[in-house]
Image: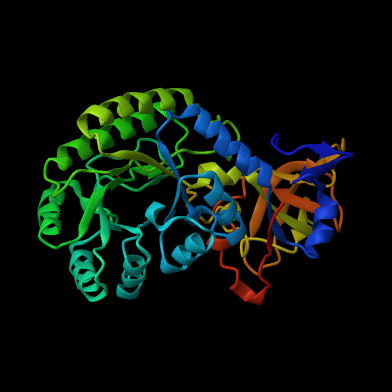
Amino acid sequence: MRQFPVEDGELVVGSQRLSTLAARVGQTPFYAYDRQLLVDRVRSLRAALPVGVKLHYAMKANPMPAVVGLMARLVDGVDVASAGELRIALDAGTPPAEVSFAGPGKRDGELRQAVASGVLINLESGREIAVLQRISDALGLPARVAVRVNPDFELKGSGMKMGGGARQFGIDAEAVPAMLQQIGGSGLAFEGFHLFAGSQNLRPHAICEAQMKSYELALRLAAYAPSAVCSLNLGGGFGVPYFAGEQRLDLEPIGANLQRIMARVQSEMPHACLVLELGRYLVAEAGIYVTRVVDRKTSRGQVYLVTDGGLNHHLAASGNFGQVIRKNYPVAIGNRMDAEDTERVSVVGPLCTPLDLIADRMELASAQVDDLVVVFQSGAYGASASPQAFLGHAACPEVLV
């Protein structure tokens, strides 16, 4: 992919040739994340956004501690979805005031940890109010809360819909006024709203429409709030191109739309800070998955490259993480980037299942045993979103270079 240079036919990641990086890691398969690409992505995004919009990293996209530590220094806050992620975010030095905790199934112990840590808790049910009230009384600390709203619309064209219709996420918009009244009598510290309509969207005008609708919904609900709104999280939804024919997201109309929303916030919700919560968009293109060819075989005319890693490490690349119709991720033979000889091959992993397919009949450089297969766009929802214990294979190391 164009974000990674090539030297003498080898992919270069973090200023290191792929073969050298593999030797440094000491084994294959592995994930590698390019530090400079992460820095560049945040910098370019900030340049496209209005001044004053806060940028939060949704660390569920990639919770590797070294990545979170870097991102915590680049962005304004971190969004977590479990007590485990909360510990990583705080260990990375993220100020508790800039950590938010979302998720539909927060356990009582997790809520207690969140209150004790002083982070913002996105309420997703009436039960959480009662639990937080007891915890706040016991600790002598009023829980900081925002209401996660399930809007009455969705992000059109999103890869994964997170709002609209019946959802396990958040509070249905029509039920929020009653919940706000309940919060007002509970002693909890209300701070604002969180809206997340969808993810992985490459249509800027759909994102703009969802952001404007989210703002207008939050403005209507603010009339019922027990105190002024000081945090308004409009979610994310920014997509990255994975498959042939997909175009990179154009940030210009999104920035202009957010500028219009910011102007309204200043007059209509003057105490509110506007937050964007992004994960995949910040990290996906900075990461690669590297696996080594251990066998080459032909079955009835079809060439198979059998590698030492597969869906157990990279479920998404196998097509089993949200794809309805399987499509190939961008794949290359990383140590033969300038090879002229190519062939149509399928790349498979070592597992005893036909689902373990990394590339299906792709045109790749002619490869042999010990060559390195690279899966691009692998910085998000890779190692942590895969069944690494499946069939007893070793876990996959990750490096930030």
**Residue 294 in view (yes/no):** no
How many numbered dots are placed on residues in this image? 0
From the viewer's side, name the closer residue of 354 and 393.
Answer: 393
At x 55%, y 44%, the residue is 74
**Residue 298 in view (yes/no):** yes
Question: What percent of the width, then of the height, locates residue 191?
Answer: 25, 50
Q: Is residue 385 above or below residue 98?
A: below
From the viewer's side, name the closer residue of 161 and 187.
Answer: 187
Question: What percent of the width, then of the height, locates residue 143?
Answer: 26, 62
At x 32%, y 72%, the residue is 112
Q: Is residue 169 left or right of residue 223?
A: right
Q: Is residue 160 left or right of residue 59?
A: left
Q: Is residue 386 left or right of residue 199?
A: right
Q: Is residue 104 left or right of residue 128?
A: right
Quarter holding residue 247: top right
Question: What percent of the width, then of the height, locates residue 315?
Answer: 57, 58
Q: Residue furthest right?
A: 8
| Colouring mode (rainbow / by chain / secondary structure / one colour) | rainbow
Quarter holding residue 105: bottom left
The quadrant of the image that shows the N terminus is: top right
Q: Is residue 58 above or below residue 271?
A: below
